[in-house]
Image (tube, rainbow, N blue to C red):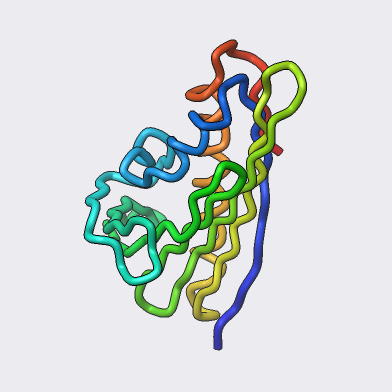
């Protein structure tokens, strides 16, 4: 039986929206942001994808450390939206829908919704890892994009 749940966060950065889209749509650069990623390798795009990758993460379960790999596809790249889907055995999927919008004062608002689906026995661990990693990513994202350090926020 599969379980599914979502979480979201928002980041504001003082940058051009194009810069945010370029960074977030290039999964090859996610090692700069995502605390679990240790390697990203680009592949020829799968049918229906704008770009495809194999990503290696380093995870921990108590004292045990292990590496895992998964496929990730960038499905949508637009000036106001990026959609990616990552798939890992067994039957685990992470869907990332990112919406971008310009705000007054030269800010870009980045709203991210992550939806994770996984087999029930793995779901709790996978969801906790995904949420912790993406909240750490949010903090790094604001700092990396922000031309004027300070106003980046994640919630």
Residue occupying the far bottom of the picture? 1
Q: Position of residue 33 (x, y in %)?
A: 43, 36
* Residue at 36%, 53% in the rendered image: 59
Residue occupying the far top of the picture? 148
* Residue at 25%, 46% in the rendered image: 39
Of residues 35 and 108, the one drawn nearer to the viewer in this rendering: 108
Q: Position of residue 34 (x, y in %)?
A: 42, 41
Residue 48 in sight? yes
Q: Position of residue 65 (x, y in %)?
A: 30, 54
Q: Position of residue 61 (x, y in %)?
A: 40, 58
Of residues 130 and 71, the one drawn nearer to the viewer in this rendering: 71
Q: Is residue 24 left or right of residue 47?
A: right
Determine which quarter of the picture holds residue 32: top left
* Residue 116 to residue 97: above or below: below
* Residue at 57%, 31% in the rendered image: 17
* Residue 150 to residue 110: above or below: above
Determine which quarter of the picture holds residue 2: bottom right
* Residue 62 to residue 150: above or below: below
The N terminus lies in which quarter of the figure?
A: bottom right
* Residue at 32%, 64% in the rendered image: 71
Residue occupying the far front of the picture? 79
């Amino acid at each position: 039986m599969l379980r599914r749940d979502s979480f979201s966060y928002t980041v504001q950065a003082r940058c051009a929206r194009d810069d945010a889209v370029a960074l977030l749509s290039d999964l090859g650069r996610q090692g700069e942001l995502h605390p679990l990623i240790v390697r990203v390798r680009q592949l020829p795009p799968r049918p229906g994808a704008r770009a495809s990758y194999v990503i290696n993460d380093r995870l921990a379960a108590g004292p045990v450390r292990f590496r895992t790999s998964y496929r990730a596809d960038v499905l949508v790249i637009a000036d106001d939206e990026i959609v990616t889907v990552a798939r890992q055995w067994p039957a685990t999927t992470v869907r990332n829908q990112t919406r971008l919008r310009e705000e007054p004062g030269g800010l870009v608002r980045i709203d991210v919704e992550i939806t994770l689906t996984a087999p029930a026995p793995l779901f709790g661990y996978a969801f906790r890892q995904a949420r912790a990693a993406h909240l750490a990513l949010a903090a790094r994202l604001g700092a990396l994009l922000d031309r004027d350090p300070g106003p980046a926020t994640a919630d």
